Amino acid sequence: SAKDRGPSTVAAYDSRLHAEALDRLELRADLQRAIFQNELVLHYQPTVELETGRITGFEALVRWQHPVRGLLSPASFVPMAEETGLVVQLNTWVLFQACRFAAVLQNDWRRPTMSVNISAQQLVRTDFVEQVNRALSESGLSADRLTLEITESVVLQDLEDVVPRLSQLRDRGIRVAIDDFGTGYSSLAYLTELPIDVLKVDKSFIDRVASDAQGASVTEAIISMSHTMNLSTVAEGVEVAEQAAWLRQVRCPIGQGYYWSRPVDENGVHDLLTRPTNELGGSADLVSYRA
Ligand code: C2E
Ligand code: MG
Ligand code: MG
Ligand code: MG
């Protein structure tokens, strides 16, 4: 009966919460170990010049090769790493690893850039600039091949400290990108004050361009604003030919998404770079899209 089900449902719920809490505790201890035991891996997703289909660079995306749970996505452990402060160690590892691999790729004629996601806790540290300098000098990567991706909320959180720090890095030739642009709730006015080079337009805007006229016009306005500010624009999460064609039409220079490639491992990167560009979806489609 319903009377019987009531309490047992609660009990089941309690024990589920308990299991989740244990799970998290275990994961936290695990992550600490993982950072030192080489269980983290980087996958790389290309960015592509929309006009030609040519690869311009890669973004380093961390995964955790967990011995029991399998390959974990960053969504399942980066937030926990943020909460516990472990994200600083984690991202330091990512930065050095990505620079090391990017230095290898400098031999390719395209000299692809490498983008690394930077978290708030990393950026507010006084030794951040020094750390980036060290990653460059130890790897031999030239500064103009490195892009740091930062979300709007992170920059705005601590403008006074962060802006001079970013300016210092840009003076060296490192590029700064605003990641997931448009998902924050801040005004556009501040953008002109920031020392940035690239705007990465969030996937949620790209999702709408081929189906929804109003959504398309908002996205077009963002791309045109980015042009006006002399920023490079990257469209995130491009999945289908119609989106790529629309982006070309509104003169968005660069795209990233499953349409060209999912994030791949180091071997996958070498494969992508040895493939003729017309085998990447980008230049193969000649769809003419009319808004
Ligand atoms: P992000 O920096 O915005 O990275 C893009 C995410 O979108 C990646 O997910 C990528 O696999 C996914 N993506 C790219 N193209 C498409 C597409 O066409 N369709 C769909 N549905 N998704 C696409 P991923 O690798 O799961 O990373 C998620 C987020 O985790 C990243 O978002 C970034 O914020 C964070 N992250 C990844 N690596 C690191 C890291 O090393 N450090 C820190 N702090 N955060 C990281
Ligand atoms: Mg990113
Ligand atoms: Mg992004
Ligand atoms: Mg995103």
Image (cartoon, helix red, strand yellow):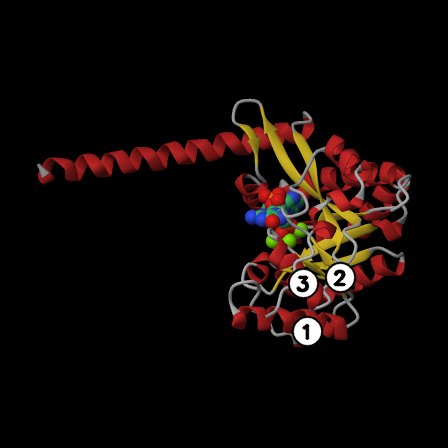
Q: Which residue is mark 2?
A: 253
Closer to us: 228 or 173: 228
* Amino acid type shown at disc 3: Leu
Eyeballing the image, is 76 above or below 219? above
**C-alpha span from label 3 to label 1:** 25 Å
With respect to residue 194, does 15 lie above or below?
above
Q: Which mark is residue 246?
A: none
Q: Position of residue 266 (x, y in %)?
A: 75, 33
Q: CA distance from mark 2 to mark 1?
A: 23 Å
Residue 126 in sight in this render: no
Of labels 2 and 1, the one closer to you:
2
Quarter-of-image position of residue 13: top left
Q: Are marks 2 and 3 in contact (CB under 8 Å)?
A: no
Q: Report the side of 15 relative to 272 (left or right).
A: left
Q: Which residue is mark 1?
A: 190
Task: Name the residue type under label 2.
Answer: Pro
Are dots 3 and 1 in contact, CB under 8 Å? no
Decide which of tag 2 and tag 1 comes sooner along the chain: 1
Q: Counting other residues with Cα less than 10 Å from the Cα at mark 2, is it few (<14), some (14-19), or many (20 or more)?
A: some
**Disc 2/disc 3 C-alpha distance (Å):** 8 Å
